[in-house]
Image (cartoon, rainbow, N blue to C red):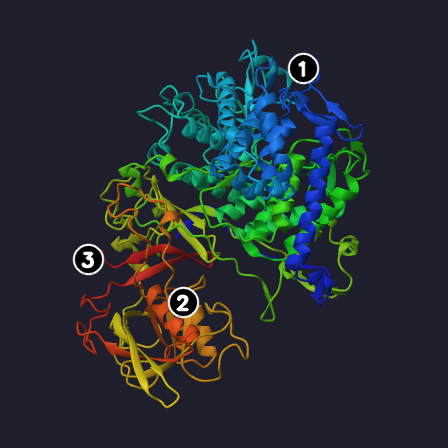
Amino acid sequence: MRWTLAAWLAILLLLPCHLAGASSSSRLFTDERRVELREQVRELFQHGYEGYMKYAYPADELRPVTCGPLHRDPTNVNFGINDIHPNASITLLDVLSSLPLVLPSEFPDAVRRVATEVSFDQDVKVQVFEMTIRALGSLLSTYQYLDRLPDEPVAQARALGLTGKAKAARKGKGVDVKRYRGRLLEMALDLGKRLLPAFNTATGLPYARVNLRKGLDKGESVETSRLPMLVLLTGRFTGTAGAGSLVLEFAVLSRLTGDERFEVSAVWGGSCDSQSADEHSLIYSSAQALAQRAYLAIWNRRSTHNLVGNTIGVTHGHWLAPGLTGVGAGIDSYFEYGIKAAILLDDDVYLDIFQDTYAAIQTHVRTPDGFIYRPVQFRLLQPGLPSTIDSLSAFLPGMQVLAGDIESAIRSHLVWWNLWRKYDALPETWVWQERKIEWAGWPGRPEFIESTYYLYQATRDPFYLRVGERVLNDLRRRTKTKCGFATLKNVETGELEDRMESFMLSETLKYLFLLFDPAPATPPTNRVFTTEGHGLSLAFSKLQKTSATRRAMHRGEDLFCPRYEPPTLGGLVVGIERRVDYEYARSLVFGWGVDGRVIEDKESVHWWEGGFCSLPSAPTFSFDIVLTPLNATDQEVPPEDPAPSASKVRRDEATGDFIVADVSGLRLSVRWRLDNRGYDVASIGPHRVRPGQQVFVTDQKMEGYLPIPANPPATLHAPREVLLRFSTISSKGERAVFLHAAASTATFGKSFGSAGPAGFGIGGLGMLIRPKVNVDGCRAFKPGEIPDVRGVLVLDRGECPFLTKTLHAQMAGMDGVLLVGLAPTPPELLVQDPSTPGAGAGSQTEGLIRPSADGEPEELLHRVSEMGVVYVEHIVGQIVLRMMEVERKAVAVEMMLLEAEPAREDLKPGGGDGREKVREGRVMVNDWEIWNLRILERERPP
């Protein structure tokens, strides 16, 4: 086994370590406290909105210090102002979709003004990206909100919660805001048409700016004024984020209006390698979406490391020197729209691209400690100098939450949290190696609080509520003026700039409001927030059907988001502030000395000067390996085979798994699993291996990885299914059978094929016990949570591994576990293909499954070897639990054999099908297992 990137070694640093203690800083936020903070946010939002409407409307922005309107710069060279000033009341437009949530009383008048007083027929040049995310996104989001409202005005008023108009609503007057629905969609379509001329390029990349009335100005030039003069004279350029972050808004506009000018363009070809042709469908036989064409035009020009640059030529498609990449300004939302387009559009093309780009970021942009994401040259991989991080890249933790990488999100967020604690805001750019500010301004950007909101939703750790409270107080103290919120020109001195950007209301205060709102989260859907905070969704009927070829490529796929596991200290669950690397994150901003201690709560942190804390080291996220025999030398490694034949690698059409018959010349890309358990194979040469798909190597040259054959065990985990008989037990000991149901047995624990009447087994009788709390058994049971008697514990399937539940039951003195399956998915939440037989005909159920503990340590498996573990479907569990919890009956369970299976099977190694078990070996790199890779002595029979 060989790999191309070496692992980083952890080292120890001597620094003061804190000891945790109880204090007010670790208090839990009650719902009452959250509502109090939410209402404080609402008051700030109202202050800024009313200030804009009183002193600035219909201008685009407010001057919050002098309380006047901010207009376009007549010189047309101030891109920072003019790019987002269309003379169309951009602040009102941007905030429109937030009003029903935060300030519903102002929504009727606001939507009326937008529908009747705002026009995009303006002779001004604006930025395509900013108009798309601020104006187009808000119009579409508000249209979708109006579309969901009831038709009756009285019902609309009630849905909006217009308490001030409750009397009018009762009198039958109501509020008819839905009448503006059609007008808003017309405005969105009109704006979209005015942006279309920017896409008239040979490369598919849109120009950065367009005149809303005249289209492209003659000699349209560059995206940023900070480009070298030579560049200004030789081409037309755009930013990666600006060109590649239009997909959500343009796709929704196209699907809602049916206007093919947004969905269809000229046939797009372009050069691409074998993997992009196979995996990302860059060459289409039909017309291609404009925004998708731009997104793919950037991806098609990625480096060999799957990195994209920051700025690119519109006319020639070449990257601009010095060719830096990263996650900050100019490139940030390109990655964000990859994962969000995959969710919104149910399009695996975007998901594939996102997973490739994210792996490249984690491998090449992230520092070895796993905390800093700094700019690097996207071809040479050398860090940029000076090495800075900017406030825009604080979006990253939120995106990582959506991707399921909670651990990385926590680490990157801690850096921004400490920056906020140091400056009471976020400087625009910060030189992280020297711990000094490069650009001291902060215009009230939302990215940090947006990520805080996402992390709270994922972890429910009150730490993130405390972060939000700190941000709220600092905003009020440092930026609030008599009529709005000013930009911080210098976060160190507190000097203000007379400008309030629209995102202060539409995003920063909106995400703070959502963070503190204790209302339960809505069920998961394909609804996403755009990069400007506007909610968009699409009904199933608006999604494009996946081709049969791509559906086949996903056979066997099992996408999952790991459950967040909070840190523990001495066996007790603790919060983010008690993580072992929390001190390290603070040291990155404050240094290794004592300066950072002054910001900590003195009542909760105690110091010991002799403490040692380890320097974190994140495992290498992605690298290539070459499969070779154990005794092979470097000289025996064959050259890479970039296009292996089907005789070497083939995909099982039934399962989606890959069979490797010949490892010669194969390069396997492996990636870190987001559950932090090790690696998975992500690709075999040009073949993408998706999560859940397995790779089986049957090449005889790899037999050195196979385990030594052992004698078959005396007993095996059979039968696979049993019959359970449930009875109520009266106080006199009388039994009354009320249910027979099939159950599947686990592949670990007690083997029921040989179990006698003792305990929970064939012929035995076990009393059922249901815990009052911890009903999924995912944590150890505390004294008093379950009766101190032996029995069979009834547990929900939940989120943690089956073995974990069984261990906790065994520690509590139970004889066995009865696992209850997941509830069926309601039909309205299913995203189904209508052409699939049975689609829409009822709920989605999972049926019986066999709980397993593959890959778990033998020591843990031995501890539960006498525990009986069975699994029943959800409906069976509900019947039994109703008898126990509603009818208050004592319930016992008896296990019997199904007639199809004998009590004992003399089986060959492998199980109940009589076939001989195929020996398999596993592969490790850097002490981590590659979970979906198996070395087999021969191919398994079908």
Residue occupying image coordinates x 46% and y 17%? 201
Q: Camera-side residue: 34 or 319?
A: 34
For marks 1 and 2, give the CA distance: 64 Å
Q: Which residue lies furthest to the bottom in this view?
A: 732
**Vertical position of residue 637 compared to residue 594: above or below:** above
Q: Residue at x 29, y 70 (%)?
A: 743
Task: Estimate the x, y position of residue 146 in percent, counting from the top left.
Answer: 51, 35
Nearer-the-camera pick, 610 or 799: 799
Q: Where is residue 799 in the image (x, y as percent from the top left)?
A: 45, 61
Residue where numbered disc 3 is placed = 941
> What residue is disc 2 on?
802
- Which numbered disc, 2 or 3, marks the residue that appears first in the sequence? 2
Q: Which of marks 3 and 1 is nearer the N terminus?
A: 1
- The residue that disc 1 covers is 76
Secondary-structure class at tag 2: helix
> Which residue type carries mark 1?
Asn
Considering the numbered disc 3 on the image, is that residue within a helix, a strand or a loop?
Answer: loop
